[in-house]
Structure formats: structure tokens, C-alpha cells
Image: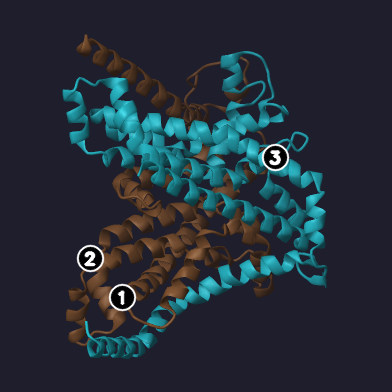
Chain colours: A cyan, B brown
Amino acid sequence: MDQSALSVSATVARASARREGLPALALLSPFLLAFLLFFLVPTVETFWLSLTESSLTRTNAFVGLDNYATLLHDASFWDALGNTFYFALLTVVPLTALGLVMALLVNRFVRAQGWLQGVFFLPFVLPISVMTLIADWMLQPSSGVINHILGGQRPWLADPYWALPAVAIGTVWWTVGFNMLLFLAGLRNIPAEQYEAAALDGARGWTLFRNITWPALRPVTTTCVILQIIASLKVFGQTYILTSGGPFNTTRVTLHYMYETAFTQSDAGYAAAIAMAFVAVVILLSLLQIWVVSWLDRRDA
Amino acid sequence: MNTKSTLGWTAIGAISAVLLAALWAAPLLWAMSTALRPELETVSSDFHWLPQTWTLDAFHKTLAAGNLLRWLFNSALVSLAVTVVTMAVSLMAAYAFSQLRFRGRGLIFALAMLAFLVPFEALLVPLFRTMNALGLINSYAGIVLPQVVSPVVIYVFKGFFDEIPADFREAATMDGAGPLRVLWSVYLPLSGNIVWAMAIVTFIAAWNNFLWPFIIVTSNDMMTVPLGLTQTYDAFGVRYAQLMAAALLGAAPVALAYIAFQRKVTQGFLAASGLKG
């Protein structure tokens, strides 16, 4: 393209930008208004609040980084963060592995596909409190079905060692269907010719899985693991409803601590500092995901 | 030899499929079995897998005693409002981002996608303060409004609009149709599938949202189903047949929606996670 053509196309682009600017603004304005009010301003406000001493309704004084200094030495905060990571540890691997197994089974048994997929996915569309009501009933010490099967009268949700694992098992039941869906989509993207070619070479069962399925699914597996880590950092409802953070705060997670600080203690400034720390962890993990994925790509290339 | 080992794998697979499916169906089946017995049977030391006396008593009592019908109504109203507003707002924004040229387009889109990075959970404190200042605590508007900002939906719609050949738009524009008219009569009919899928997923997410109503609602009459169900211990006490009946009634609308629209739901969740169905 020569110079004059370039400048003509630039003029056309400028003219159309002027002509389309107003309609664009009109179409965007409902979104921009909501985005400003319910995302951008609150995001900036969270940061601002974290530098102040504030209650839920009023801002009292600018205190600089005091809230962050307190946070560094706050054992309750680190305990809550520790519980959150323990919850991640308890859920991420089972959720990913079971999601994969379920997807393989759904994919293998074509005639039962609709049923199997439905049974595995249904819990995911249910409200959280349906899961917690049923879990609470099943885990009852004296009349619960779990203790009937296992024998004994263990009060699962009031036991410092078992409370968080019990919540984790409920969470796996509730959310694994989503991971199954991701793996199922990944499986369907593998070309059938790859299996046919390998089958001609005499490959069967486990060999097929190890040489074709597993490598092809790796991007899905990575996505799944990272999504699950981030989701488990955001855990709140399950532990809040089932155990209220107890016994002895063994199930009090980061968001629960933030909620208590803001809405029970009415210490909005400190709660905002906790929120900022929480955002920092989530962003770091998202960046880690991008880095891991590109590192895996480069290693393969 | 090979056929034998393949058969072995098939058998192992079939057995694990049946076992896993049974395990995943069990909690809901057990809830049904509990809800269908008289209250006394749930605390009896005599254990039975099935009710000894079958009765709908727990369902009747649940519907009569608690606020469940009110919560169902609130949930339906709120989820419908969130879905309609989110779809309208996101379709218009996605069309502008995808099809119109204007200054700052890249910057605004990048800013909008920032919302992927900062989780909603981190914004609870200022959002509550804003709602409080606006007098929207315990109101439908207060529950609905913060839920309509959905970068995922805009991202999916924009991706879809990007694939539609520009000829469609140019032809309509020649005929003198404005952008809203082109969006409505050209782009919307072409994207019916993905709009339905995203609408259903948005509806399910709004129906199941626990955290935001939990923050913004304190009055029992304004509660949605996920929030209200956590109050049932206060309403019924520890009556497990009634609690299970409440859980099943609260689960029914989304469960039925999923069973009716299984393919669309699947497609919607996959699109929202960045994968194709």
C-alpha cells in the first residue's frame, strides 16, 4: 500500500470513528454505568479503605499502611489463610482426577452417556445450601447414614481433624461435574485417527491412554487445576453454613475472616486490607497459570 | 490375548461407572427417602433405607410452615431480572466492542476484562457501603444490580460477533438501519443459540448465588432460596424429614431446568470457560 492509500484509509477510519462514536457510546453506556458503579469504583475504594480506619458506614482516619502492618503479625489471618490452602490441598487433586475419570467413563459408555453425564453434573447446578443441608443430615453423629455405614458416633463436623475434610468431600460431590464437562470437551477434540493409527500398531487400553489421551488433555488438566485452586481460595459458603468456622476456628477460611472483620467487628478498613491480600494471591496464581502454560508450550516446541 | 485385556478394561470401566454413578446419586436419593417418611422415623434407632410409612407429610408441613414459597418467588424474580438485564447490557456492549470503531475501544475493553482478575468477593465491603448509602439494603434492586456486570458474557458474545462476516452489517447499514436495529434484527437472530446458552447459565448462577444475597439481605421476606434454606433450622428446628423436603423443593427448579435444557446448559458452561462444546 502506498502513502496516499494509507492516508486515505486512515481518513476513512477517522471518519467512521466519528460517525460510530456516538452510537457506540449509547450502546456501551448501560454496561459502563454498571461497570463503574459495581466494579471500578468498589475496586479503587477497597484499596482506599485499606489505608484508612473505617467502620461499615463511616471512614474515620487515614492510617497509611498500618492495616497491612497489623496483617503481617495477625496470627488469625495466617491461620485462616492456612486453612484455605489446606482446603485447596484437600479438593484440587480429587476434583481434577475424578473429573477426568468421569469424563473417560461418559465418553466410553456411549449408550449410557446422557444418564451418566446427568448424574455426575446435576449436583453442580444445585444451590449450595441444598448440598449443605443434605451433608449435615448424612453426617449427623447419631442418626446420620454415614455413621450407620461406618459404625460409631463420630461428630464429623464438630471434630477438629475431620471437619474440613468432611466439608471438602461435600464440595467434591457438589462441583466435580464442571471438571468432567471440561475433560469431556477435551476428549472430544482428540481426532479419532490418532487412536486408529495407534491401534493398528497394536496399542491397547493403558498404552493408548498414556501415549495419546493424557498428553492431548494436558492443557485441559492445567486449566482445571488452576481454576480449582482459585475456586478453593474463594471458599466461604460451605464452611460458613456447615461449621461456622468451627470447631476452634479449624475451618475458618480467608473470606470468612474478612467477612467477620467487616460485618461482625465493623472494621471495614482492616477487612479491605484482607481483601487486598486476597486479590494479590488470586492474581499471583493467575499469572502463575499463564507462565506454566507458556513454559509447557515452549518445552514441547 | 488383546481382546481379553480389552474386555477386562471394559468390565472394570463398567463396574466403576455404575459404582460412581450410584455414589453420586445417593445423597439426593437419600434426601428423598428421608423426606418421604414421618418425622419420627428419622430419629428412630431402627435404621431403614426406605420409609416404613410413605407420606408427603414433610412436604405439606414445609410448604405450610416456612417461608419457602416466598423465597422461591424472590429467587425466580431476581434470577429473571439478572438474566434479562445481563443479556441486554452485555449484547449491546459486545456489539459495540466487536463492530463499531470508536476512540478508546481497546482501552475500555481491556479495562472491562480486568474484572476477570479481581474476584467479586474482594469487593463486598465497598459494595455494601454503596448499597447502604443508596438505601438498597433488603431490596430487589440491591440484590440484582451488582450481578449484571458479567465480563464472561461480554467476552463470549464479542467472540461470537467477531466471527459474523461484516457483509451482514454493511448490507443492513446501507438500508439505513441504526446500530440497535442491526443488533436486534441481524446479529441477534444469528446468535440465538449462544444467547440462550448464556442466558440459561446466567439464570442458574443467579439462582444459586449465595454470597451477595447473604450480604445484602437481612429480612426473611427478601431472602432467595439458597439463603433462605440456611434459615430452615430456625423455622423447623432439627426436623430432618422437613429439612430434606425443603432442600428438594429448593433444588427442584434448577434441577428441572437442567434436565430440560441439558445440551444448552452444557454448551453455556463450556463457552463460559473458554472451550467449545
Please name which of the two marks, 3 or 2, marks the residue nearer to the observer. 3
Q: Which residue is mark 1?
A: B99
Q: Taking A94 as reference, is B18 above or below it?
A: above
Is residue A278 found left or right of A183 in the rendered image?
right
| Mark 3 → mark 2, Cα distance in angstroms | 49 Å
**CB atoms at circles 3 and 2 under 8 Å apart?**
no
Viewer-closest of A195 and A127: A195
Tell me where residue A245 appears, x and y as whole percent: 71, 40
Q: Are marks 1 and 2 on the same chain?
A: yes
| Mark 3 → mark 1, Cα distance in angstroms | 47 Å
**CB atoms at circles 3 and 1 under 8 Å apart?**
no
Q: Earlier in the sequence, mark 1 or mark 2?
A: 1
SS class of the residue under badge 1?
helix
Q: Which residue is mark 2?
A: B190
Viewer-closest of B138 and A2: A2
SS class of the residue under badge 3?
helix
Q: Amino acid at mark 2?
A: Leu
Residue at horizontal 31%, vertical 28%? Answer: A211
Please name which of the two marks, 1 or 2, marks the residue nearer to the observer. 1
Q: Amino acid at mark 1?
A: Gln
| Mark number displayed over residue A82 | 3
Classify the position of the C terminus of chain A by image quarter: top left
Viewer-closest of A222 and A299: A299
Q: Where, by quadrant of the figure, is residue A179 drawn?
A: top left
Q: Chain of mark 1?
A: B
Q: Amino acid at mark 3?
A: Gly
How packed mark 3 is, by other alpha carbons closer than 10 Å (few <14, some 14-19, many 20 or more), is some
Tell me where residue B165 appears, x and y as whole percent: 20, 70
Residue at horizontal 65%, vertical 57%? Answer: B215
**CB atoms at circles 1 and 2 under 8 Å apart?**
no
